[in-house]
Amino acid sequence: MRYYDHVLSFAIEHPWSLTRPMLCVVAQVLARRLAGEELPRAELEAALVNRKNLPQPRAGTISVIPIYGVLAPRMNLFSEISGGTSYQKIASQLHEAMGDKTVKTIVLDIDSPGGSVAGNPELARELMQARTKKPIVAVGQYTMASAAYHIAAAATEISAAPSAQVGSIGTYGIHDDLSEALKQIGIKRTFISAGEGKTWGNSAEPLGVEAQARLQAAVDDAYGMFVTNVVRGRGQGMTEERVRDEWKAHVYSAAEAKRLGLIDRVETLDQAITRLLTDSSDEADQRAAETFTSIYDTPQEPAAIAAVATGQDRGSDIAWQNEIERQLQEL
């Protein structure tokens, strides 16, 4: 199972900006793999849909970029297990939208608990540069946390659905001490190495003081970039002290997030797109607004309404995400 060894190495060596519930899922999967249990990849693949080529739907001059699930720099790493989205894919769709002269506004459709720090600040900075040329609106429906909020904070403005969860501005690293487990099964691991610190933080030994300090420094650095980019992205008198001391790493309801300044509006994805189309002076948007509004005002199932905005079946997507989390938790 060399594939999972590669994923395991990536997950341990990089800090993460992820919500606590998903942290439990990640930690459980990694711990069982470290203990020598094989992960049934075939069962996971049976529950996965193809997330590598998510559509980039259009509404008038608005381009919608879907950002779902656990985030990672490349699709063939942890994102393939978690069913998430890669920063690489998001950047590719951003470049496509920026290069398309018929696209006037970009909407980020976010439903993610966060993910890897690796690649996260780079994408945030790219989005901040892009918004100087085209407005970027981030919409949280229904989770916009940790690394996903880092991305959203780089947008021109942020909205969240009434039932959305927003925030979790924090970073962590993972270390599993398996020394007692190895002892119980009669394994004593010896490392032959060169170079001070080469074996620090290995899972066969308790985490040493020096190793913990190094891990903490890496987490602190990642957190510092996170806070700095949130301050730059939000602007309007935002300070690092406010982010660190007032917002902290809590997750907030949409109403509370607006009161605290994490978001600008409480609105659904459909409402955000309708607003942007209606406020636009472009004829294509005016025509799209008439069609979109008439569909939005017609009584439909929520999944059908969401499909109008994103080109995807939200109900199916939620069912898929629940199945992935269930299978991961059973490992």
Image: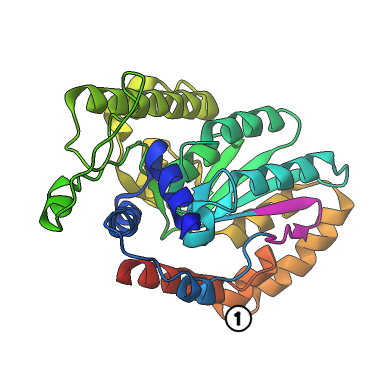
Tell me which corner region of the image, top left, top right, bottom left or bottom right, holds residue 9.
top left
Task: Return the x and y of residue 294 as percentages of the image width and height.
Answer: 72, 72
Q: Which class describes the residues within 10 Å of circle 1: few (<14), some (14-19), or many (20+)?
A: few
Up the image or down, 300 lies above or below 184; here it is below
Residue 315 visible, this orientation = no
Choose between 195 and 22: the one closer to the eye: 195
Q: Is residue 193 left or right of 306 when viewed as pictured?
A: left
Q: What residue is drawn where x is 74% and y is 36%?
A: 134
Q: Where is residue 324 in the image (x, y as percent from the top left)?
A: 44, 69
Q: In this view, does 283 lie above or below 39?
A: above
**What's the amino acid at mark 1?**
Pro
Q: Is residue 276 left or right of residue 73?
A: right
Percent coordinates x, y for residue 12 in the rendering: 37, 42
Identify which residue, 76 or 250, lies in the foreground: 76
Q: Residue at x 53, y 51 (%)?
A: 77
Is 57 magenta? The answer is: yes
Asked whether residue 202 is in view, the answer is yes
User: Quadrant where the C terminus lies?
Assistant: bottom left
Q: Nearer the viewer, residue 71 or 228?
A: 71
Magenta region: 53-65
Could you say which quadrant of the image residue 219 lies in?
top left
The count of marks equals 1
Horizontal side, residue 225 vs residue 217: left or right: right
The answer to if 117 sits in the magenta stretch is no
What colour scheme does the image use? Answer: rainbow
User: Which residue ends up furthest to the bottom in the rendered image?
Assistant: 300
Residue at screen point 60% across, 35% down: 123
Tag 1's secondary structure?
loop
Q: Mark 1 points at which residue?
A: 299
Residue 106, x across and y down, in percent: 70, 46
Which residue is found at the position 30% from the left and 59% from the top?
36
